[in-house]
Amino acid sequence: MEANTGGKHSFVLNMGPQHPSTHGVLRVILEMDGEHILEPEPVIGYAHRIQEKMGESRSWPGFLPNTGRLDYLSALIYNHGYVALIERMTGTEVPLRAEYIRVITSELNRISSHLLWLGAFLLDLGAFTPIMYAFDDREQILDILEDITGARLTYCYFRVGGVFRDVDDKFVERTRAFIKRLRGRFKPIYSDLVTTNIIFIKRVKDIVNITPEMARRYGVTGPPLRSTGVCYDIRRNEPYSIYPELDFEIPVGTSGDCLETYLVRVNEMEQSLRIIEQALDRLPSGPFRLKVPRKLKLPQGDASFSVETARGELTYYMVSDGSDVPYRLKIRVPSFSNLSMLKELCRNMLLSDLIMALGTLDLVIPEIDR
Amino acid sequence: MHVTRTLPPELIRIVISVVVVVCFTFLNVLLLGYAERKISGRIMRRPGPMEVGPQGIFQLLVDGVKLVAKQFIVPSEAGTLFRIAPLLAFMPVGLSFIVIPFSNRLQVRDLDTGLVFMLAVMSLNTFAILVAGWTSNSKYSLFGAIRSVAQSVAYEIPMLLSLLSVVLTANTLSMRGIVLAQSPVWYVVVQPVAFLIYFVAGLAETNRAPFDLPEAESELTAGFHTEYSGMGFSMFFLAEYTNMFFVCSLGVVLFFGGWSGPQLPYMDYTGIIWFSLKVYFLLFIMIWIRWTFPRVRFDQLLNFCWMYLIPFSLVNLMLTAVVVKL
Amino acid sequence: MKEYFLLLFTGAKSLLTGMGVTLRQMFQPIVTVQYPRERIAITPNFRGHTELVRDQETGTHRCISCKICQMDCPSSCITVNSEKREGVKGLVLLSYRLDFTKCSLCGICVEVCPTSALGFSGEYELAGFESSEFRYDLLKVMEGRE
């Protein structure tokens, strides 16, 4: 890998696949001059698991666990995209109660993913306690979701035609109690300890500079895009499920630096709480699952479906030849496009700031490698 | 004819005190390490060590045994001083216990320039880190060592300036003299700015958070002691805790009145109880700060030193000089 | 000049508020459940590996060896062995092998079983020394339970 160093001495530092802050098996080859990085080059592929090939050999109930393991932190949203794609292709109706349950659990999953991101981001910064407080809140969510889905992390809860198990009053009570608890913790713990802390602000402000034009070139979506000021969220721009009926805002930043992305994500957590509250208030009664045949024949042709995960826009694209197993399944993940921006974003940066930039992009490496 | 030579009593006294000082250092590390893990656990709402002994009090002993039993791995391209660097880190700080007055009569040697000796010893710490980072022959270690050297050298200046203000007020450089000069009121009341500057500079000197860039785990995978294992690592570990104790005890002697406090029986020998309580109070604040704040970035660290600490300490020194003269 | 002092004071105040937060948290009860000395009750809806459900009336399993679960399993981890015995209507189940090292806990076998013979066991304390310990024979497991 040759780079024009302009006659200066430079050396290559390898932030290898095993590193505490790359959040997975990501290798970044850094060409450095002292403490400044001349150019980073990410190398991926260490966690490739041929998921798309497996999508071509399994029928829809068989592939469903795989979707949960693509991005294990927002597994329910990945499930949602896949079953909604099949429902779109076959024209299956979903009962209204199931849609509401899907939205409630997806938003809970989004909050838990953001909480983990917050803890890990601060751990990279060197603050060891906020991750513990964030995980304390996350434990509550995992307990609530374990009660209805049966799993803690890699959920496989949605089905074509609804959800696997109905929710009961205990779930509604626990979720309401959780919403109240988390709202009460935003100010005293997260805001006072982290957001207003001067060391944190100085470390995070004006670090990376994502411009809307750069984001458009690389196809960046999710909080990094929204922090630049572009209000693009699949839940508003290509609405699905019952999101059009709910009233929530899309937090948008102004300057596209690390601090703005951080604030966008924290505000997203608050908005998710709002969505869950409204959905719980309006939860209708009725069936939670419609029967579909076990071997569901997919009509010939292709279709795609986009959802908004915690990291950005996820799109499933399927080409079918008329049998119950797809011919081709393509998954477009948000972290891949977000990572591709790293090379241009982090030129002439300090090593400490590269860690901040990686944390801001919120990468999950298994979904990049699929 | 057989000539017997009797040992001078001074020599016996020195040997005993050296042995006692080394034992004290190890015991201190045991207690401080345990305190840190328990307090950090409580801050994070978890129990801390609980398995070994009731409430985990033997945890550090067992850790020490484990570390000693591990193999001391030397990288194949390491420099010649690789094995000596841990000793270099630990030895000067251990030496410094000679001049600390633990109570009115418990002091190994009261040098007339005790303060200068303490500061000289503190600067040797930088040397050990540099040797460790350089001879490890690893880029990550070198990074850690370079950062640490720049940080230590930069933060010695405000520390010196703030301590000079105390020296001007006390009019003596010997440690015992400074404690005795604090009879009516402690210097933390007379010179609060100097205390704050000294404490912050002390955090930076011992490479503790929020200034722990040289050993930043998330960026540099343990910085300058990446390549050390077993006894070498435990020596660095010991050196860090002893350094913390050293900085806090210097702070207690200079600002909190050393061994003075409400009267206990045999005050001449039991002043050590008050001394230890004060030192551990300062150590608790150090631990508390570590587990609360994120790390400061390297250039911001140096910026903070030059733009904020040095001007304030200079102004403090000049004001002290003016007031003392009056 | 004014920003210099303003930054200093707001910064110091934010640091002190942060320290206050951690101090308050220090006196709150600990969150950790010290396993294995204390355990929390796991919800009965938790999905462990599958198991053959013991029918209340007949006192044994309900499997009719139709092998639909074996055909539908996407990870091919189920093997059903059965034979025809004289005088017994239907097939007799000899062994039901589940290779848990390959199972992805999708639940297809539980859902497609026509007699609802399978259920989730809720076992979460799974630790072993060899991988052969995780190739279960569910018939033996059911008979091992009371």
Image (tube, grey):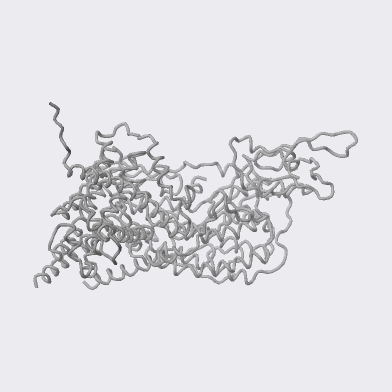
Q: Farthest residue in the front direction? A: B1
- Residue at left 18%, top 42%? B11
Q: Is residue A37 visible?
A: no
Q: Position of residue A350 (x, y in %)?
A: 30, 52
What is the quadrant of residue A15 in the picture?
top left
Quadrant placement of the N terminus of chain A = top left
Q: Position of residue B212 (x, y in %)?
A: 31, 53
- Where does residue A97 sit, x and y in percent of width and height? 67, 65
In the picture provided, is B220 more to the left or to the right than B166?
right
Q: Is residue A109 left or right of residue B171?
A: right
Q: Is residue A181 above or below residue C142?
A: below
* B324 vs A210, nearest the viewer: B324
Q: In the visual, does B58 lie left or right of B125?
A: right
- Left or right placement of residue C35 versus residue B245 in this view: right
Outermost residue toward the left in this view: B325
- Residue A247 in picture, x, y percent from top left: 55, 72
How many numbered discs sit on the rendered protein?
0
**Res. C84 in view:** yes
Q: Nearer the viewer, residue A117 or A331?
A: A117
